[in-house]
Structure formats: structure tokens, C-alpha cells
Image: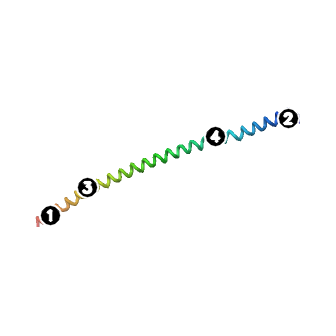
Amino acid sequence: MDEWGVVGVLAALVGLAATLVTPMIRLNTTMTRLVVLVEELSDKLSALERENDMTHAKLAGRIGSVRGDVNAHETRITVLEKGGK
């Protein structure tokens, strides 16, 4: 094999390497971006769950106070109904 044959083989190897490396770099970049997005979504979901738990606790407190008011009104109505007979 003469010098130009070696140069041709080296050029073919460089072309093959570039053909293989370019998609691998793109894939690696895409996977990194996806990992970052999944982590962000996970953080946002955790924050949403915490906010949801706090809202449910507030609603439970309000329901408890309304339940007490309803019971008091029910007692008053019962007393009024018995007194009117």
C-alpha cells in the first residue's frame, strides 16, 4: 500500500468516526436535557403536592367549623320546634 492508500484509509476512518460520533453527541445532549426536564417536573410535582396538602388541611378546618355551626343551628331548631307544640 502506498502513501496515498494510507491517506485514503485514514480519511475513510475519520469519516466513519465523524458519522458515528455526531449522532452520539446529539443523543447525549438530548438525554441530558430530558434528565433536567424530568427533575424540574419532579420538583414542581412535589411543590404541587405540598400545596394540595395545605389546601386540604385548610378545607378540613373550615368544614369542622361549619359542622359546629350547623349542629348549633340544628339544636336551636329542635328547641324551637319543641317549644311551639
**What amino acid is found at the position of numbered circle 1 in the picture?**
Val
User: What residue would you read off at disc 4?
Assistant: 26
The residue at 56%/42% (across/down) is: 33
Q: Find the residue positioned furthest to the left.
A: 84
User: What residue would you read off at disc 2?
Assistant: 5
For marks 4 and 1, give the one nearer the viewer: 4
Residue 28 placement, left or right of 58: right
**What amino acid is found at the position of numbered circle 2 in the picture?**
Gly
Distance of label 4 from label 2 (alpha carbons): 32 Å
What's the colour scheme?
Answer: rainbow
SS under mark 1? helix
**What amino acid is found at the position of numbered circle 4 in the picture?**
Arg
For marks 3 and 2, give the one nearer the viewer: 2
SS under mark 2? helix
Picture coordinates of residue 6 (x, y %)? 84, 35
**Mark closest to the chain's N terminus, 3 or 1:** 3
Image quadrant containing the N terminus: top right
Q: Find the residue positioned furthest to the top.
A: 4
Residue 70 placement, left or right of 8: left
Picture coordinates of residue 34 (x, y %)? 56, 44
For marks 1 and 2, give the one nearer the viewer: 2
**What amino acid is found at the position of numbered circle 3 in the picture?**
Ser
SS under mark 3? helix
**Mark closest to the chain's N terminus, 4 or 2:** 2
Picture coordinates of residue 18 (x, y %)? 72, 37
Badge 1 local density, few (<14 within 10 Å), some, or many (20+)? few
**Mark closest to the chain's N terminus, 4 or 1:** 4
The residue at 72%/39% (across/down) is: 19
Distance of label 3 from label 1 (alpha carbons): 21 Å
Residues under numbered marks 4 and 1 in contact, where contact means CB atoms less than 8 Å apart: no
User: What residue would you read off at disc 1?
Assistant: 79
SS under mark 4? helix
